[in-house]
Amino acid sequence: MHRRMTLRLVVMWALIAATLSGCGPMGQPVTQIQTWWAQRAERRALTALYWATGGPNWYNDTNWLSAQPVTGIAFIDNALGFGSACAWSYVRCTNGYVTELVLTGNNMSGAIPPEIGQLQNLTRLDLGSNQFSSLPPEIGQLQNLERLDVTYNRLTSLPSEIGQLQSLRELGLHHNRLTRLPPEIGDLHYLVALGLGYNLLTSLPPEIGRLQNLERLSLGGNPLTGLPPEVCQMDVDVDIDIRPLCGG
């Protein structure tokens, strides 16, 4: 009987909440229940990230895994798994949604879990100066991501899904162990800055020549032996003299 009454109260509260309105991270109208469910998915994704990357050994994990109440009624939060992650260290929110995750130099190791793709409102992801050797294909699901920084890691390759980041403007990859780049990198049409310095690249895919909005390209510190004509003809600011690599 008690369980049945509790369930009825939860359903009743959910129906009431569904009529309440608020704003999403981009200012769009959403119902309160939509906000709670989105926050629930974000908490689950961040929790997966914590455990997959050695969270207990991070330099700073203040408030991680703690539950910040959102409905104001404890048994509803507990029953439905609601709770905001906005009080967790390095997590930044807009209108209650996770929009920035800045975990630079936090002693992270292991593998970035596929749940990272559930952070649909993320505009900035900084994972530089950690110990990652790969990015999961699900990284391509972050359709609002504008800045991705994975510098000073141990990346040896990139997933082809990197080309699905249609909002990306800055991509920092320098000081890794990349030996090649996927041709899909040429699909990042809004990319303005591409940092590739200090990897193990001997050339670049010709598809980079399709990056019409690219303004800055760093290549220094790579064992480059040549560049395709599509790259040589680009009007961009490069940190090295590429004429010897273009036959000039």
Image: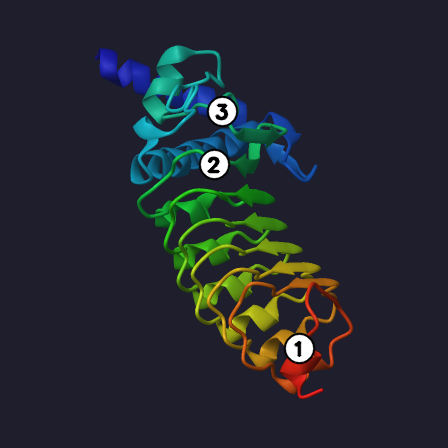
Estimate the x, y position of residue 132 in percent, counting from the top left.
38, 49
Residue type at the position of mark 1: Gly
Q: Which mark is residue 21?
A: none
Residue depth check, mark 2 versus mark 1: number of the one nearer the observer: 2
Q: Is residue 37 visible?
A: yes
Q: Pick the quarter of the image with the N terminus.
A: top left
Mark 3 element type? loop
Q: CA distance from mark 1 to mark 3?
A: 39 Å
Tell me which amino acid carries mark 3: Ser
Left or right: where does residue 100 sit relative to residue 129?
right
**Residue displayed at 33% across by 48% down:** 111
Task: Check the image and report above or below for 248 versus 40.
Answer: below
Which of the marked residues, 2 or 1, is nearer the chain's N terminus?
A: 2
* Label drawn at residue 105: 2
Find residue 187 and report its image quarter.
bottom right
User: Label 1: which residue?
Assistant: 209
Q: CA distance from mark 2 to mark 1?
A: 32 Å
Above or below, 92 relative to 245: above
Identify the residue position indicated by label 3 in the image: 89
* SS for callout 1: helix
From where the camera sits, is residue 145 visible?
no
Residue 174: x and y, percent? Answer: 54, 56
